[in-house]
Amino acid sequence: MASDPLGLCDYAPEAYAPGLLSGWALVWTMLGIFLGGMALNLTPCVYPIIPITVSYFGGRSGQGQGRLVVHGLLYLAGLAVANSTLGVIAALTGGLMGSLLQNPLVLVTVAAVLVLFATSLFGFWELRLPGSLTQAASRSYAGYGGSLFMGLTLGVVAAPCIGPFVLGLLTWVASMGSPWLGFLVFFTLSLGLGLPLFFLAIFSGSLEKLPRSGEWMLWVRKLMGWVLLGMAAYFIRPLLSETLSMALLAGVALAAAIHLGLLDRTTAAFRGFQGIKTTAALAGVILATFLAGSWALRGPGVTWQPYSDQVLAQAREAHKPVIIDFTATWCAPCRELEEITFHHSEIVNLAEKDFVMVKVDLTQKGNPLHTRLLELYGVKGVPTVVFLDRGGNECRNLRLVDYLPPEQFLSRMAAAGRKN
């Protein structure tokens, strides 16, 4: 395939970090993970560790506030190192898992595992660790090394409660395939999980103000269970129609609101618990409304043509640039391109007036035409978006192999549409 011999498509693509998170989406996601880590402190397995942790640090209060802070920071560091290492390892498998997640059977399996872990958090079964492993992890050690060790092993002690949530998060991080993002996600989770314990250790007087443990902690577990169900719905989306996938996500949010805010009869002795339940219910309703509303109010998308040599020949005769989108229904970034970028009003208008838009759907294997096109254009995976200039030559430096926001996609369209 010829590739822009005259340099008519010269263009330096804007820097963009591939993946599902960037900009404000990354900020809000990290904030949610941080708050989720804090909420994990209120689960039945973690809550009893709070007085143990405070007692551990309290026994070192005679060493001075400065050294106590060092102990606390080492405790946080141990927790962060353990969890962040898990995140990086999961992300490093992203290439392998990314290819596996192109298989519908794998998507169904991942979603089923997340649902299984969610049922554990709902109380249908319990995830238990061997007693010897739990005892070894919870053993107290002296010195700065002891504080570091306590942080390293907190995840083991709390695993029966936080394990399903963390395993679900590991699956999500692995699917994104970014080691730095894997580190960031679990470092943020560690801060959320360890920061309250750190401050309670430093200011042990706050222990008297803590709400007493009780039935309300089971409500927190159920909340985490709904988070996992939402993640399962996210993974299964590529196998569903656009309407059904959006309805599923909105349905999960609405069902969580009804269950946690109305149907659940959990009570607590401390003030404000009912307010927390009401806030969670309202958040679920708002999220469901936002998802349904954003889909219903969305404008028309790009009109695509199926690939044929005749379509490309007509585009050359009409002196129009061509965009070829290699996609598949099970590909999450492909769906994101379709639902966001290819529904952007400016892109839709520009595509209708000045471009020939061609889609090659690789969902089903075995099509001889698709096999020829994959070899012709050197397509290694999906999404792959190929830009042809007005003479039918590919602008190789414009090729796209991941999701790109509408504004940056418009810049590539402008470069491909330059006159010869």
Image (cartoon, rainbow, N blue to C red):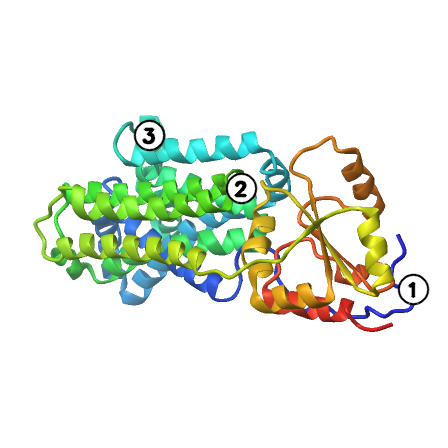
Residue bearing the label numbered 3? 127
Q: Secondary structure at mark 2?
A: helix
Type of the residue with mark 3: Leu
Image quarter of the C terminus: bottom right
Q: Nearer the viewer, mark 3 or mark 2?
A: 2
Residue 385 appears left or right of 58: right
Based on the displayed image, in which of its 4 quarters is residue 369 positioned?
A: top right
Identify the disc placed on residue 342: none
Q: Secondary structure at mark 1?
A: loop
For the point 64% across and 37% down, the residue is: 363
Based on the displayed image, in which of its 4 quarters is residue 303 positioned?
A: bottom right
Q: Secondary structure at mark 3?
A: loop
Q: Nearer the viewer, residue 343 or 232?
A: 343
Q: Position of residue 329 (x, y in %)?
A: 59, 42
Residue lying furthest bottom: 419
Asked if one can make out residue 71 in the rendered structure from this viewpoint, the answer is: no
Q: Position of residue 305 (x, y in %)?
A: 70, 50
Residue bearing the label numbered 2? 238
> Mark 3 and 1 residues: CB-CB less than 8 Å, in contact?
no
Q: Nearer the viewer, residue 153 or 140?
A: 153
